[in-house]
């Protein structure tokens, strides 16, 4: 019998192959879970650092169509002028060296986005998992968002992105308590949250994942199984922001900036000339929200 079952570590990195019988043994002992279901071809299992009690294995199977963030698979969105960010390796709270994608800057009003196109199965439930730090501040000016865009106009991921598809996106605000993470912890690198974004593909097979940051620096990274975060103290986003306000009082000038009038271009489609004009107002102190805006070439 060949070793034809792919073995992944907890970060979904392939580390080898094993026999089907051995894979079933690892499943029964709670030391591994199937990725994509037991009937998927090729079969894949994810090894677990800590064994899972048998009663918890059914919960793992319900989330079999899980897509874990891999920083290497994302790239900057060329539709954005902002290019604040980089991929880099850090040592996390467990002492592991992990690759993250850090985007945005606290004092930058330019929107930075990273994207990844994926091909998925029709009429299938998926969960996109990732962890993040940053993405919010004490004043509430920060913008951090995750978007899922069904590319219904595309037959291949390599096709030019259609603006009409952008209007069909679903946004998840990562800097507001209205959309809660499944895990929120006080870590040495700041407020750490884990998100599990459920979505259904319907008749579409090509999707774009987009992360957005403005007025903030935020780092996106793979997420561990939730029990791996048990050593970190719990803290909510609201509690973290209140603590930050107490530790770093907002200056008078910052308060004026936070409460000045704002021009809202959220989701708007702007020509390059219109964008340049808006940036002139921004340079004079006007607050402008370009979240999800599309900048297009001028029409001759």
Image (spheres, helix red, strand yellow):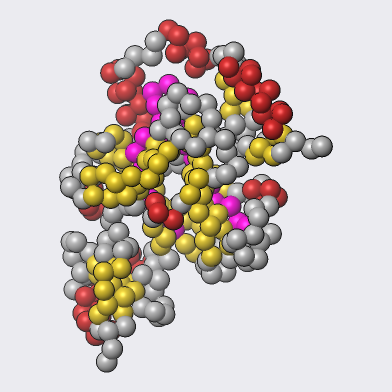
Residue 118 on image: x %, y %: 52, 61
Query: Residue 237's image quarter?
Result: top left
- The answer to if 149 sits in the magenta stretch is yes
User: In percent of the image, x 32 and y 29: which residue is there?
Assistant: 240
Q: Quadrant of residue 205?
A: bottom right
Residue farthest toward the front in the current orientation of the protein: 300
Task: Give the main secondary structure of the magenta stretch.
Answer: strand
- The answer to whether 97 is drawn above or below residue 178 in the figure is below
Q: Is residue 290 visible?
A: yes
Quadrant of the snapshot with the N terminus: bottom left
Q: Give the vertical position of 242 relative to 292 (above or below).
A: above
- The reply to whether residue 46 is in sight is no
Magenta residue span = 127-152
Q: Does the magenta run of residues contain 11?
A: no
Q: Residue furthest bottom?
A: 1
Q: Residue at x 65, y 39 (%)?
A: 294
Judge from the rendering whether residue 96 lies leftward or rightward of residue 101; answer left or right: left
Q: Is residue 126 left or right of residue 241?
A: right
Residue at 32% x, 23% y: name it.
244
Q: How many marks?
A: 0
Q: In the rendering, at what x and y percent does residue 9 appear?
A: 26, 64
Residue extending farthest right: 300
Q: Is residue 226 left or right of residue 68?
A: left
Residue found at x 47% / y 56%: 198
Tell me: 22 left or right of 161: left
The C terminus: image quadrant: top right
């Amino acid at each position: 019998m060949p070793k034809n079952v792919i073995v992944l570590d907890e970060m979904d990195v392939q580390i080898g192959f094993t026999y089907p019988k051995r894979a079933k043994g690892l499943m029964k002992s709670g030391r591994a879970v199937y990725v994509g279901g037991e009937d998927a071809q090729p079969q894949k299992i994810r090894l677990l650092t800590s064994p899972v009690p048998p009663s918890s294995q059914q919960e793992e199977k319900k989330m079999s169509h899980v897509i874990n963030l891999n920083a290497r698979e994302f790239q900057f969105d060329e539709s954005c002028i902002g290019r604040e960010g980089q991929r880099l390796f850090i040592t996390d709270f467990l002492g592991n060296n992990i690759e993250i994608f850090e985007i945005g800057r606290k004092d930058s009003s330019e929107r930075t986005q990273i994207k990844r196109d994926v091909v998925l199965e029709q009429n299938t439930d998926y969960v996109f998992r990732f962890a993040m730090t940053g993405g919010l501040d004490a004043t509430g000016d920060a913008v951090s968002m995750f978007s899922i865009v069904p590319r219904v106009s595309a037959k291949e991921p390599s096709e030019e992105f259609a603006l009409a598809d952008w209007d069909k996106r679903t946004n998840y605000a990562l800097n507001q308590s209205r959309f809660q993470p499944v895990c929120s912890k006080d870590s040495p690198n700041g407020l750490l949250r884990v998100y599990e974004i459920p979505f259904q593909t319907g008749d579409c097979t090509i999707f774009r994942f987009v992360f957005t940051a403005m007025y903030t620096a935020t780092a996106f990274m793979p997420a561990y199984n939730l029990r791996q975060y048990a050593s970190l103290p719990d803290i909510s986003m609201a509690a973290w922001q209140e603590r930050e306000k107490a530790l770093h009082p907002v200056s008078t000038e910052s308060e004026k900036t936070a409460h000045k009038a704002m021009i809202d271009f959220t989701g708007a489609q702007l020509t390059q000339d219109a964008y340049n004009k808006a940036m002139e107002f921004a340079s004079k102190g006007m607050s402008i929200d370009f979240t999800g805006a599309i900048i297009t070439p001028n029409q001759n």
